[in-house]
Image (tube, rainbow, N blue to C red):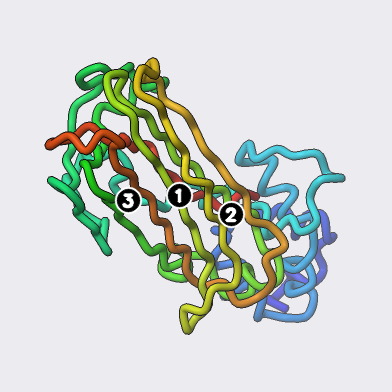
Amino acid sequence: CLSGMESLPEAVLVRILASIPAVELVLVCRLVCCQWRNLVDGAALWILKCQQEGLTRAESEVENWQSFYFLSKKRRNLIKNPCGEEGFEHWGEVENGGDGWKIEELPGDFGKEFPSEEVHKYFVTSYEWCRKAQVIDLRAEGYWEELMDTTQPKIMVRDWYAGRSDAGCLYELCVKLLSENEDVLAEYKSDTVTIPEGNDGSWTEISHTFSSYGPGVRFVHFEHGGQDTLFWQGWFGARVTGSSVTLEP
């Protein structure tokens, strides 16, 4: 080991290593010697780093503290432009039935405010099916192969939908976990949700958690859409906003 450091008590060495950025611990420090590799692969170092950075969890709930640390630090919404603030940027595979997708300001005609004050806009569908999708490249977002294949962190999917109170509409959500070759390894497909005419216009959250989905997941394909049921020209169909995909520690 480095001069003099091999004689340090292990608890002291753990404290020194805990001051080093996590990526360098894994990519550099782990390669120094067997002792350092064992410390970087062990729980004590990562428990300390979690404590130092306020990442708390009951010890009995954590199987791998290194994975828990990285997943906690990376935890964020992987859906880009979830509320239409950037127009239709980042959304692909767009199906523009009827008059196509439109973005409107909350609460919209015959609508209700969103539960979070941080959301200001929503996407709205027309009188034939409108669908749009986003593909998340997990490696590009920093979730490496071994983490996905071994830890298999829970993948939490959420979406919000609403109708307008003067029109009925339909809504659907479909999320697929894809392999390197884009084979479907797991899939969640909601029922077709029917919102009747005369509804109160309030927002409803739909969610699904993927777990124990097996090795090989590299992409998340998120797709949602809807239409109105009165076939009125314009934008009387399902409203969607606040979509999210997060990997949970």
In the depicted structure, whether residue 203 falls above or below residue 221: above
The residue identified by callout 2 is 155
The residue identified by callout 3 is 80
Which of 219/174 is in front? Answer: 174
Q: Locate residue 7: give its quadrant.
A: bottom right
| Label 3 neighbour load within 10 Å: few <14, some 14-19, many 20+ | some
Q: Is residue 210 in view?
A: yes
| Kind of residue sitting beneath label 2 | Ile
* Percent coordinates x, y for residue 86 in the rendering: 18, 45
The label number, if any, that marks residue 70 in the structure image: none
The residue identified by callout 1 is 173
- Residue drawn at (16%, 48%) of the image: 98
- Residue drawn at (63%, 68%) of the image: 147
Q: Which sits earlier in the primary sequence, circle 3 or circle 2? A: 3
Task: Calculate the distance from the C-alpha at mark 1 to the C-alpha at mark 3.
Answer: 17 Å
Determine whether, in the image, residue 95 is placed left or right of residue 135: left
Which of 58/102 is in front? Answer: 102
Which of 97/67 is in front? Answer: 97
* Percent coordinates x, y for residue 206 in the rendering: 52, 38
| Label 2 neighbour load within 10 Å: few <14, some 14-19, many 20+ | some
Please name which of the two marks, 1 or 2, marks the residue nearer to the observer: 1
- Residue drawn at (49%, 81%) of the image: 180
Quadrant where the N terminus lies? bottom right
| Kind of residue sitting beneath label 3 | Lys
In the depicted structure, whether residue 37 falls above or below residue 94: below
Q: Which sits earlier in the primary sequence, circle 1 or circle 2? A: 2
| Kind of residue sitting beneath label 1 | Leu
Task: Calculate the distance from the C-alpha at mark 1 to the C-alpha at mark 2.
Answer: 15 Å
